[in-house]
Amino acid sequence: MNLAKFLSKRTPFFYGWLILGTSGSTQVVRNAAASLTLAVFMYPMAEDLGWSRTVLAGAVSVGGLASTFISPAIGWLIDRYGARTVLTSSIMILGISTFLTGWATVPIAFYITYGIGRIIFSSPVQIGSSVVVSRWFIKKRGRANGILTFCHSIGMTGFPLMASILIGIYGWQVAWHLLGVGVWVIALLPVFLFLAETPESVGLLPDGEDEFLQENETLKPDIAIEEVNWTLREALKTVALWQLALAGGLLFIIHSGTNTHMAAFFQDAGLTSNQAAAAVSLNAIFTGLGGLGWGWAIEKIKARYCYAMVAGLMSVCAILFSTADNVTEAWVYASLFGTALGGMLVVPSVAMADYFGRASLGTIRGFTEPFVSFSQAIGALLSGIIFDITGSYDYAFYTLSIVAMVAILLTITATVPIHKDTKKG
């Protein structure tokens, strides 16, 4: 049962905003499998089960690497069967896998249950939610994706907090069970009942700026949305696709290479564990706020310039981190880096939709997402290796700053490709 057709012309506001809220609920609950949520479970699980922290953290990398190979298929499934089907199935599986993690008392079981959740976190929810929002909004695509990132930030802050409270009351096993149920309560019914693939499928137009379409009416040429749609095969022949995909991967190297080690680095710099935890929290909060800001900016500034600005800010932050030696600097730099991460989550999604259109966006995003998941896996490892060799994170930050500079060059030169049909016109 889907209520989208019934509700779409009866809501007092553009139905796309309800689509955004529904998609946002999936961004909130994906954090059941976030590394920050696992961090809350790490101590009690290690103490109770006798596992090393390396064993626990390894599930994050395994799930991330697995999603590298699964993402292309997810993108195809979204275009073939719809984001509603993919997201509904994903939320159902995420709830089950999170619930079962509470019974995972041997490493192989934990790697299966949490690893499946991590795949859902990295691939179908990430791709599906942003694709459906980008299909409902064109002129307001930036702010819509910014709000979507803010929803992720809510989950990134809320799920670890809920986990901490539940562990304190019921223990880690029941906490996993309750988080799994929470996934279903928050997102399953909204996605199943309210999600629609495109505004045209329920008789509306993107952004809600025009009148309703009549039953079975097609778009008239004078009100059709001017957007060129590329197939994956066509997009692969453009230099811009490869530039955007590679740049996105490089930014996620910086993201995981910094965030994974942030708390440890600040403690090495002399902060207490609570002060370092506060820096991590500020990073998460400003990721959401930054997403809103970058969503507004990309509607005013060309996508490639916004992309380059995000990379530039990440480069500056990497250098600043190497100089942090007190609480104030740590909190300011963590907040600034969170602002950059908000752009990293918003700008690439909007750029792909702006450059290549809505029709095959799922397939195109499915192809480019492995650049992200693979980079997330190697970024944390890169910083860890540099630290082990040099005994300091300074050279890791210098390396990440250089990586960001390469991303600047790739993005600022990524001009919008011209489709063959446009040339004919």
Image: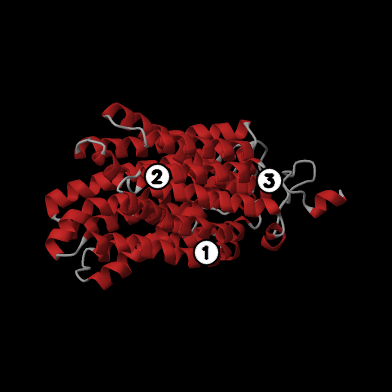
- Residue type pointed to by label 1: Ile
Sequence-wise, which precedes: disc 3 or disc 1?
A: 1
At label 1, counting other C-alpha atoms closer than 10 Å, the crowd grade (few under 14, some 14-19, many 20 or more) is many
Checking the image for residue 213, the label placed there is: 3
Residue 394 x %, y %: 37, 42
> Can residue 10 be seen?
no
- Judged from the image, the secondary structure of the residue bearing numbered disc 3 is loop
Q: Distance between the residues labelled 1 and 2?
A: 37 Å
Q: Which residue lies furthest to the front in this view?
A: 390
Q: Name the residue under label 1.
A: 74
Vertical order, 201 against 210 (above or below): below
Q: Earlier in the sequence, mark 1 or mark 2?
A: 1
Q: Which of marks 1 and 2 is in front?
A: 2
- Is tag 3's residue or tag 2's residue first in the polypeptide sequence? 3
Residue 411 as seen in the image, left or right of residue 341: right
Percent from the top left, x then y, of residue 237?
Answer: 72, 59
Taking depth in this image into account, of 114 and 257 the one nearest to the observer is: 257
Q: What is the C-alpha distance between the residues marked 3 and 1?
A: 31 Å
**Circle 3: residue type:** Leu
